[in-house]
Image (spheres, rainbow, N blue to C red):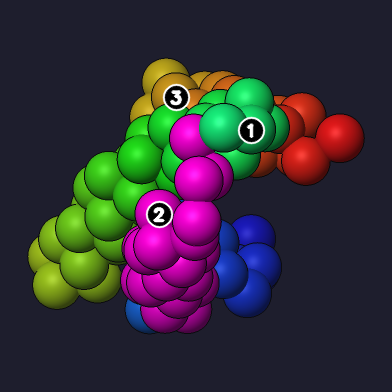
Amino acid sequence: MEEAPGAVGTSASFALRLGQTLFSSASLLFMSLGVDFYGYTAFCFLVTVMGLVIPWSFTLALVDVYSVLVKCPLRLPGTMTIIVVGDWVCDSFTLDSLS
């Protein structure tokens, strides 16, 4: 079976997760530096969500590094289910806080 670009356990996936971690950190920093951001519920929720997305993305980046170094793809059904559900929850929380 051909490997999809950015699939879990590849160097492209590591780059994408690292980018997600860096941009989430930057958005958290800029939102926290804003004047009276805590006065708006949406910003408070988004800051909380970014605080959850950063460790999630960093953990998956570490999993990708391990998978690339060991040359063992982690595409077991249970592992993929955890990753898909975790990404779905993080993404839906991020998008829900923007509306």
Q: Which residue is mark 1?
A: 40
- Write down the quadrant of residue 50 in the picture: top left
Q: Main secondary structure of the magenta part?
A: helix
- Write down the quadrant of residue 7 in the picture: bottom right
Instruction: Name the element at disc 2.
Output: helix
| Residue 60 left/right relative to 10 | left
Q: Position of residue 84 (x, y in %)?
A: 57, 32
Residue 75 drawn above or below residue 69: above
Per the rendered image, the range of residues in magenta is 12-38
Q: Nearer the viewer, residue 88 or 63?
A: 88
Q: CA distance from mark 3 to mark 2?
A: 30 Å
Q: Residue at x 78, y 41 (%)?
A: 98
Residue 62 drawn above or below residue 87: below
Crowding at dot 1, Cα within 10 Å, few <14 / some 14-19 / many 20+, comes out as: few
Asked whether residue 13 appears in the rendered view, the answer is no
Q: Position of residue 63 (x, y in %)?
A: 24, 52
Q: Nearer the viewer, mark 3 or mark 1?
A: 1
Q: CA distance from mark 2 to mark 1?
A: 12 Å
Q: Which mark is residue 82?
A: 3
Q: Which residue is mark 2?
A: 32
Is 78 colored magenta in this rendering? no
Q: Nearer the viewer, residue 96 or 14?
A: 96
